[in-house]
Amino acid sequence: QDVAILPDGKVIVSGYSKTFTSSSIICWRFLNDGSLDGSFGTDGIATLYSGSKINMAWSVLPQADTSAIVGASVYKEGDDYHPGIFHVLNNGSVDQDFGENGIAMAEYKLGTSTRVIGAKTPDGNILLSGTVFDTGDNMATLSQFYLNGETDPIFGDSGNVIVATDTTWSYFGEDADCNALSNGRILCKATPQANGDLVLFQLLDNGSIDSSYGQEGYLYFNNHESTTSGPMTSDSNYVYLAQSYSCYSANEDVCIDSTPNKIRIYRFNHEGVLDSGYANMGISEPFFENNYIGNVHNIAIQNDGKLLVGGVQSGFEDLSGYPANVPFLVRLNVDGSIDSSFGTNGVDLFNWGYQYAAIAFAVSDEGKIVFESLHYDSASIATLGITLLKEDGNVDSSFGINGYISFIATETRGCFWMDNKIISVVNNWNAPLVKEYLIRHNEDGSIDSSFGTNGVVALDSVSSYIYTTVAMSLPDGKIIAYVGASQTPYVKRFNNDGSIDSTFGNFGVAIVPETDAPHMDLSWDNKILITGHYVPDFLIARLLNDVSTSSSSIDQVSTLKIFPNPTSDQLVINYPFSSNEQAVITIADLSGKILREEKVSYSGDYYIINVNDFPAGIYLLTFKTKLESMSVKVMKQ
């Protein structure tokens, strides 16, 4: 990374080496003839520091006694990256009397690969400059150290001068998302374009920033690792985030890693805090096949708590022999390791055609997995392929033809299960009229003709340009869809049969702000959250829903009484039942996943349901009789 000539004419070079799990700060010293100086370190090479993450030496300053000062970015275990200085003696060893245990380290934090520049003052002190990304700002920093490694306390503020050079994030990247937490807060994720870092923040139920979260409301993973995607999902126990990243970061003087994107999995509890019991302090970095991934598109949790991760993986060839990103699905154990019992050694690959693009998948309540991938067939026609997998990752041959169906489409926008049927969100720009639509298939792969018109529900009109469409099922069996039309973005709600739900918004349609990368989720009280990138901002909007209330308190439907609420073990349901009246009670988590369903005939006014085995959190209890359907929020302590 840097080179300098020592007073005796020898040449010293500073740099680093790295593996997948660790890195080392290194110096080389050469004689005048260009050969390594065997009196320095081991055969001319000295290792100053080794540790996890990425440690880099950036600058080297020769001293009059032929020793050298090396400026570096050092990962402090269990903390973060900091600027550090080493005093390298003439024999290549680190001066242990310099700073603390041989390292003088500034307190402020750096990104992974932020360049650190060193210089000497006329009186021999050491200046160190760099850039820190702190609470949303890019900050120019300058520190001064004495020759013994101590910070100069009269320089700036306790040895440091920090100047804000860019007080904004420029604008958020396209990867913006959110996930509702059981404590009523909303965990949001963004990737500011200024640096590509991963940033999390929490919103309170009223939409304001939760300043108690992270650092003044923000949690920064300021690794300067250009995040390309970061899908999120959750169950009643954890929130998962899968990050695709590479080492290259724009607007920084950094090292460039030419390898394809890699994957990192974060697991948080419902307070938005990393789960230290998961993998390595809440972070798993699983590797499989050739260790690299082109991009992660989606993640989902199976009933047993294992995590499915899907996307497109580089390093393969398509059916024509050209380099290609092949769709993949990998399963991780609850500890973050690869589950070798899934598919082939933990991985399913889907090499169906040529030039793969987007993928989507979803898990049914019974554990079956529908997997979709857009590709081109041998005639260069854009095709959406769909396969059905069993819970163990093997193909379910009862679906379609040997487990596979396909039809013409130009993009998949996602898919989800509803009543053991598969709904795909599809785009087809080549269609003459309907370009953006929902299509529903039965579990055997046939079209469900009872849905919409011959299995299809149109979302757009030919006069509108569609940016992005997303859709999801609701706990009451309805469907909500965001349609990012250029003229007027809107949200539509449909009944289970695909007909428009005229009780929602204005005859089934609600006008919403525009975003070209939307995500949707349900809040803890089942209001509709829409998150996305809205240049130059992060956008989150909330819409009222049938089962929502106008406040964050736990309200109850007038004819239905549930107590105690909150509860620690059981719920008593009080309702004026008719003799032998049939009713169905379902309890779902905030993602809409049904955790319990009971169908019974009642002869009295009370019924007890046991929730002792449910984790603490907020759930939606839906009560259906022949004449009415009611939903109530319940809290398990």
Image (cartoon, grey):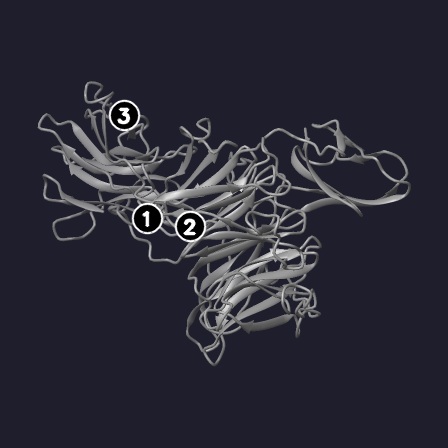
> Which label's residue is closer to the chain start, 1 or 3?
1
Residue 381 in percent (x, y) is at 47, 76
Residue 359 seen in the current view? yes
Which one is closest to the eye, mark 3 or mark 2?
Answer: 2
Which one is closest to the eye, mark 1 or mark 3?
Answer: 1
Tag 2's secondary structure? loop
Query: Pointers 1 and 2 in contact (CB under 8 A)?
Result: no
- Camera-side residue: 13 or 175? 175
| Amino acid identity at mark 1 | Ser
Above or below, 370 relative to 335: below
Q: Which mark is residue 97?
A: 3
Q: Which mark is residue 17?
A: 1
| Amino acid identity at mark 2 | Glu
Query: Pointers 3 and 2 in contact (CB under 8 A)?
Result: no
- Going by the picture, which residue comes out furthest to the front? 507
Residue 292 seen in the current view? no
Residue at x 67%, y 37% (from the top left corner): 619
- Camera-side residue: 110 or 508? 508
Above or below, 291 relative to 325: above
Which one is closest to the eye, mark 1 or mark 2?
Answer: 2
Query: Pointers 1 and 3 in contact (CB under 8 A)?
Result: no
Instruction: Tell me: 298 left or right of 606.
Output: left
Q: Which mark is residue 486?
A: none
| Dot 3 crowding, Cα within 10 Å, few <14, some 14–19, many 20+ | few
> Which label's residue is closer to the chain start, 3 or 2?
3
Q: Quadrant of the C terminus?
A: top right
Q: Which residue is mark 2?
A: 514
Residue 347 in percent (x, y) is at 57, 60
Tag 1's secondary structure? strand
Q: Gap between marks 3 and 2, in whole Å?
A: 59 Å
